[in-house]
Every structure is written in C-alpha cells, then in structure tokens.
Image (cartoon, rainbow, N blue to C red):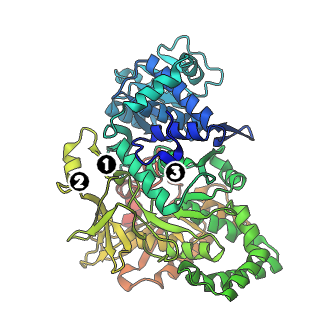
Amino acid sequence: MTATVEQSTGTATLVARLLEHAAARADEVAIREKYRGVWREWTWAGYAKRVAGVAAGLRSLGVVPGSRIAVHAENRPEWVIADLAAQGLGACTVGVYPTSPAAEVEYLLGHSEAEVLIAEDEEQLDKALAVRERLPLLRHIVVMDPRGLRFADLPGVLTFAELEERGAVPDAAERYAESVEALDPEATAILVYTSGTTGPPKGAMISHTNLVASGRAFVEVLGAARGDEVLSYLPLCHVAERLISVIDGIWAGLVVNFGEGGPSFSNDLRDVQPTVFLGVPRVWEKMLATVEIRMADASRLKRALYRACLRQGRRIAPRRMSGRTTFGDRLVLALCGLLVFRALRERLGMSRVRAPISGAAPIAPQVLEWLWAIGIPVREGYGQTENTAICTLNPVGDIRLGTVGVASPGVEVRIADDGEILTRSAGVFQGYLDNPTATAQTVDADGWLHTGDVGELDADGFLRITDRKKDIIITAGGKNISPSEIENLLKVSPFVREAVVIGDRRRFLTALIGIELDTVGNWASRRGLAYTTYADLSAKPDVQALIDGVVREANERLAQVEQIKKFTLIGKELDHEDGELTATQKVKRRAMEERFGPEIEAMYT
C-alpha cells in the first residue's frame, strides 16, 4: 500500500492503518519489549512484516475469513501481532484472560468456536489440553514460549516460531496487503467477552468500523500522536487495554512498550515514563498507598516538606483543573516540584505523562484530588466493551471531580426515565454472539446502547455515574443506596483493598472489607505486631481497630442511612480462580454474598 499517514482520512480498518505507518514511517520505533531485563525494539516496517508473516502462517493452518482465533497469554508483542494478523485475514480474535481456569477456557473456546488457540506457555497449554477433547472445532494450538517442551506426541500443537517459519514465504507481505484491501469494514474484527459479574460471560462482537471509530475519537480527545508512548500492562482481553495498545497504538502511531509485568510493573512504569497512560482506580489507589508508606518511614524533614507541598498542591489543584492558575500559583508549583513532586512523579513513573486517564471503574474523588495536588493531571472517563470504550471524558481545562466528563466526538448520551445511561455512536457494538435476546435488551431499535449504569447529566453535559443498575441497594426502609460511592470512600484509605457494601432488603448497611496486605503489614511491623498470614493479620484486634477508624471516618461523610453500622474483615485475598472476582478484578457481589453468607448473617444478629 502507498497511502501515507497523512492520507488516512478514508482508512476503514486498523490493519490498513498499520500498513500506512509501515510505508510512511518504516524505520521509526513501533514496539519495545523488555526481555530478560533488556529493552529491545521493532520498527513499523518490522512490526508489519511480522504481522504479515504470522498471517501467512495462520493461513497455512486453514484460517479463512470468519475463522476465530483465540489468544491466551500475558501482554507481549506476539499477542498484538497475532491479533492484527487474524484481523487482516478477515478472521476474528478472541482474548482469553491469563488467569482463567480450565473450565472458563473451555467455555470461551467452545462458545466462540475457536479453531486455533495461541497459548503463552506450558501453564496455558495444560489448561487447553485438559479440555481439548470437548472442543471438536479446536484444530491447532500454538505455543508462544515452549521452554523446552516437546510436542511430538501432541498432534496439532506447534510453537509460535514454527508458525512464523510456515509464514516465511516470499509473497507474505503482498498477500496480507491484498487481504486487508478486501476486508469488509462491517465484519466482526474481535470478540471481547464481558466480565460476567451476573452470569456467564457474553461475547461482544466488535467490527472494524467500531475499532476505527474508537481510534478516531480518542486521538481527538487525547491529542495522541507519533512520539507518544504507552505501557501495555492491563490484560489485552479487556477493552481498555485493547484501546490503548492496539486501537490507539495503531491509529495514532504510538510507541507501545511491553514490560515484564506482574511484580515488575512499577519498575516497568519507571523505565518507560509513558506520556499517555490509562490507569484503573486500583493503580492510582496503589500509588497513593505507596507514597503514604514511604512518607511514614521518611525523615521528619522529608515528611514536613511533603505535607507542606501537598497542602499547597491541594490549594491550587481546583484552579489547575479549571485552567485558571495565576503566576503566583505557577511559582509555588515550580518550587514544590523542585523540592518534592518532580522526584516523586519520576519515582511513580509519571514524570513525562501528559494525558493520564482513569477508567474501567469508578474512582474516589479524594484519590484524584491527591493526584492533581502532586502534579498528575488525571482525567476520569467512561466507556465499556459494548461501545468500544468510547463515551465520555473530562475535557482539559474543565475537570469536574465526581463526573466522568462530557460526550466524546460523535457520541450521544442521554438518561432514560429510570435513570439508566444510554449512549449512541459509531462505536456501539454489533451485539452478543449467538444471543439475540441479550442483544435486543442492550441495543434498542433506535441504536441506543442501554449501559446498565445509572447516572445524571448536568446542564453542561457532564455525566455523573451513581451505580450499576443491578447493584442499587434498596433497604428494608425503602431507601435507594448506591454502594459504589460508599465503597470508594472506604477504599480511599491505603489500608483497604476491597470493600463490599451489603444491605439489600436489610435494616441497615454492613460491609465486607479486605485489607491491603502491603500497607497494613507495614503498619503492623512498625508497631512490633507479629503475624504469619493474611488471615492472621486480618484477625488481629489492633487491625480490627485500625479499620474501625477507617469506617468511622467514612461514616462522618455519609448520611445516616448510608452509614456502615457493622463490618467484617474477610480472611483471604479475593481471587478470580475462586470465583470472587471477574478476570478484570471486579467483585462478584452475588458470589461474595454466597461465599461469606455466615459472616454476613452474623452482622445482622
């Protein structure tokens, strides 16, 4: 293809955009990967060449337009390469969460009718092999990182390197370009399975047109462009990370960095210092908790400087949010940056960030206030799988805490009579795979997406989300309560990791609370309080008293009917494999009420 980046107005697919970048910016860096502690990189030309080669390899396995290709791996370049290779062939990519147990893998592969599975390593291969006999359509398994495994006795299993060898044919690039040119933009490009908080995951069908609409909208609201860098760290199965690493990464031509992940996340963040960064609330809350721990152990002088600068930052933050800082404000901020905040932001990996975003779940305004005070201008936004992650975002120069901003370009938002948020845009998905009933309940005849969230629009078009429609608590006294606002208030504390408010059809509200092991453990150690396990620490009377103080402080900010009357510290960290969390770390309320039924009943006796 000969189109340049500047001539992309009519580009109809992400994969066509990839080929534009490869032609116009062949030698510029597109991807970096941290491998065994060393960063290595691929240019746009190298990126496109690998995608075309993998596409040729998949074609040799019988992949054709309409085929479904599953990817079951942590974030790594091969993930997005396989994704774009499949899309370019007219096939459909299905992401499987790395934490998914074998039963969930079986459900997702069976429901999507995947023909090829690209698994990361022996762990994910074993899950697939355990259920393969019940998946008659699964013909091939490709292993990215075999680590010495031998596949001679495993028919239909090959390595990713072997797949690329099969695709190393002279005309791979030309054939890939031809298949990209022939794509129907309205065809399904990817399947994204929803979290499944209230039942089995549903496969959301997202078209090439949906992906391009999302890319166009976010590039406009973020101003993302060549030279910007992102860190890929959230699961690529989730639409939020797909948005950053694939949709925006390709559409805007960003440099996408793949770190070593897991425990190395904070180091990866410091290495990359991204300019565009999407953080889920848990990431921002963890930053706050980390700084609180450090300050508790710092010298008296450092603590005094931090507190003094934080007071100034908080004082000026509202004017920064509205774009109305004075010369005096800028002078004070420069001094605070020199003394404290510049080094702090660099330590957090936020020294270069110009477009930090919070999304995927509600975040407490108090956390955003702290971030703005130290110079990280986080903008909260809102989107979901079913609208390809485009809906609203707080605009630069008019940040309103407690809201998720105004409608993005090309998006309409309105509130239904029952308070549900409805959206309409080119990003609204095609429907749920093989589930016309759920599709009809979600997208009406006029194209409005019924989000399942409840909210309010103010006179200026700013959207405030109050809760999930299904999560609203109605007490025995008939009061409607939004549990997420109360839970976020509790999770502002660096000592609280999880909070689940209980009270539907009950006389009063209670809560199940999970402590943050790192911060509470540090707090206990500094007081000489010995403990062995998470359960042991949670059961300590001193820890109970610590969290009681957190609850009391939160209650002071709540109306009488919203206050937590009793709480129970749960004795385990919530886990996806145990069914308490979704793959995206959202709490499954129904599962929690079943799992901790006796503890809940004890709070009402």
Quarter occupied by residue 594: bottom left
Q: Can residue 605 be seen in this view?
A: no
**10 Å crowding of disc 2: few (<14), some (14-19), many (20+):** many
Give the residue type at disc 2: Val
First reached walking from the N terminus: tag 1 or tag 2: 1
Residue bearing mark 3: 244
Badge number at residue 443:
2
**10 Å crowding of disc 1: few (<14), some (14-19), many (20+):** many
Evaluate if marks 3 and 1 touch, with contact meaning CB atoms under 8 Å apart. no
First reached walking from the N terminus: tag 3 or tag 2: 3
The residue under the point 63% across, 62% down is 353
**How far apart are labels 3 and 1 at the CA level?**
18 Å
Of residues 33 and 105, the one drawn nearer to the viewer in this rendering? 33
Q: Is residue 62 visible?
A: yes
**How far apart are labels 1 and 2 at the CA level?**
9 Å
Residue 168's place in the image compared with 524, above or below, is: above
- Residue 244 image offset from top left, x and y in percent: 52, 51
Residue 53's place in the image compared with 312, above or below, is: above
